[in-house]
Every structure is written in structure tokens, then in C-alpha cells.
Image (cartoon, grey):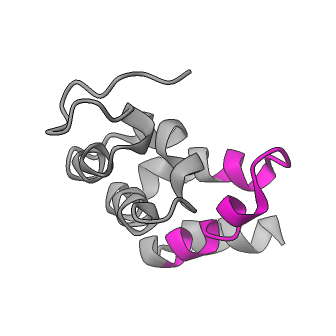
Amino acid sequence: MTRRCRTSPVGRSTCASCPWHGRAAGRARAAECAPLIVPRLADEGIGGDVAASLADIGEPVLPSLREALADATLPLDVRRELPVVLARIGTAEAEQLLVDAL
């Protein structure tokens, strides 16, 4: 489901693809936004912001990342970015999640 981003300065972006929303999600530590932004990890121009936002959320985002790692329907270019996010989180739990996914 795609929602309109009401908080974006550009307003016409969708919530899941708006880089402003991605950064705001990280600052707010809003783990519930992770399912909306994980699919945007490989998007040109905003993938870095998405990765940074997910890493800023930290351990609360790990359940969503676990689901993403196991989701064979996610595009491979998105799944390739997940280890980068886990490394940025840098906790023992994030490391174990990556090892378990191998």
C-alpha cells in the first residue's frame, strides 16, 4: 500500500519513497516505518538516506530486517543492501541476524 507523505516538504512524493520521510523516521526511531522504507534501499538517490534511517532506528528495526532477509520476493538489489544496514547498526544482535541469514 502506498500512502501520500503528509509531512514531506515536497508533498507529492509517496511516503515510502520520500527521502525526507526516511530521515524523519530515523530521527523519530519509528521502527513501524521500516516495512515502508526497506523496499526503497536500492532506489537511486534515496537508498543511502533509507539505509541511514534504518540504522538510526537501531535494534527496534531488527524484526523488520529479519523479515526482509527471509523475503524471497524482495528484489535482489534491495536484499543486497540489508547487510550494510545491519553493519551500520553494529550490535551483537544485528551481527547474529546476519549470520543466521547466511
The image position of residue 83, as x and y in percent, is 62, 73
The image position of residue 54, as x and y in percent, is 42, 57
Quadrant of the rendered image containing residue 11 = top left
Q: Is residue 10 left or right of residue 69?
A: left
Task: Give the vertical position of 91 relative to 62 (above or below).
Answer: below
Q: Residue furthest left?
A: 9
Give the residue at x 70% y 62%.
Answer: 79
Give the residue at x 61% y 69%.
Answer: 81
Q: Is residue 81 left or right of residue 23?
A: right
* Quadrant in which the N terminus is drawn: top right
Magenta run includes residue 73: yes
Give the residue at x 49% y 37%.
Answer: 36
The image position of residue 22, as x and y in percent, is 33, 49
Quadrant of the rendered image containing residue 30 = top left
* Quadrant in which the C terminus is drawn: bottom right
The image position of residue 99, as x and y in percent, is 75, 74
Stretch in magenta? 66-87
Q: Nearer the viewer, residue 74 or 57?
A: 74
Task: Give the vertical position of 50 relative to 16 (above or below).
Answer: below
How many marks do you count on the picture? 0
Magenta run includes residue 95: no
Give the residue at x 22% y 46%.
Answer: 24
Q: Main secondary structure of the magenta part?
A: helix
Task: Give the vertical position of 91 relative to 73 (above or below).
Answer: below
